[in-house]
Image (cartoon, helix red, strand yellow):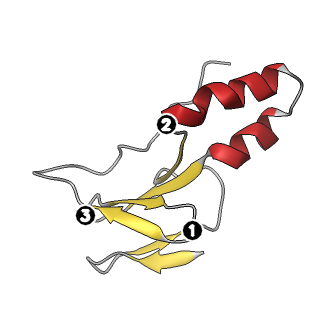
């Protein structure tokens, strides 16, 4: 998958471990997903049902969030925001 930000940057989703991609887990579905996992559902399946994908533009830091209808909704930051809000840190092994 790839799409263009309004700033002109092309955002690609064609590999794993991207620093501009994350998953949103809405609060209203968080506990039900945990309950499904506790009752034996695989974490992968329980989370895939309720999560939404998010991307951040490397150039302008806009956020794009999946609306569950296959469309990305764009949110532009206010002020001087740097790229990296979706970057994670690897847990200590």
Is 9 situated above or below 77? Answer: below
Find the distance from the CA under tag 1 to the CA under tag 2: 26 Å
Find the distance from the CA under tag 3 to the CA under tag 2: 19 Å
Is 87 situated above or below 72? Answer: above
For the point 26% across and 76% down, the residue is 7
For the point 56% across and 52% down, the residue is 52
Residue 61 location, x and y as percent?
Answer: 28, 57
- Look at the numbered discs 1 and 2 and tell me whether their residues touch, using CB distance below 8 Å: no
- Quadrant housing the C terminus: top right
Give the number of the disc on residue 69: 1
Mark 3 and mark 1 lie on one chain; the one further toward the N terminus is: 3
Tell whether 2 sits left or right of 48. left
Q: Which residue is mark 3?
A: 60
Mark 1 and mark 2 lie on one chain; the one further toward the N terminus is: 1
Q: Which residue is mark 2?
A: 88
Tell me the crowding category of disc 1: few under 14, some 14 to 19, or many 20 or more residues within 10 angstroms, Cα based: few
Foreground residue among 62 and 43: 43
* Label 2 secondary element: loop
Is 69 situated above or below 18? Answer: below
* Label 3 secondary element: loop
Tell whether 13 sits left or right of 75. right
Foreground residue among 88 and 42: 42
Asked where in the image residue 30 lies, by quadrant, the reply is top right
* Label 1 secondary element: loop
């Amino acid at each position: 998958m790839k799409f263009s930000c309004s700033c002109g940057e092309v955002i690609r989703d064609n590999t794993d471990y991207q620093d501009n991609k994350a998953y949103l887990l809405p609060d209203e579905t968080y506990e039900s997903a945990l309950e499904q996992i506790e009752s034996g559902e695989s974490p992968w399946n329980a989370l895939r049902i309720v999560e939404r994908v998010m991307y951040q533009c490397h150039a302008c830091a806009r956020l794009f969030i999946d609306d569950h209808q296959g469309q990305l909704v764009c949110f532009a930051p206010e002020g001087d925001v740097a790229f990296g809000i979706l970057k994670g840190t690897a847990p200590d092994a």
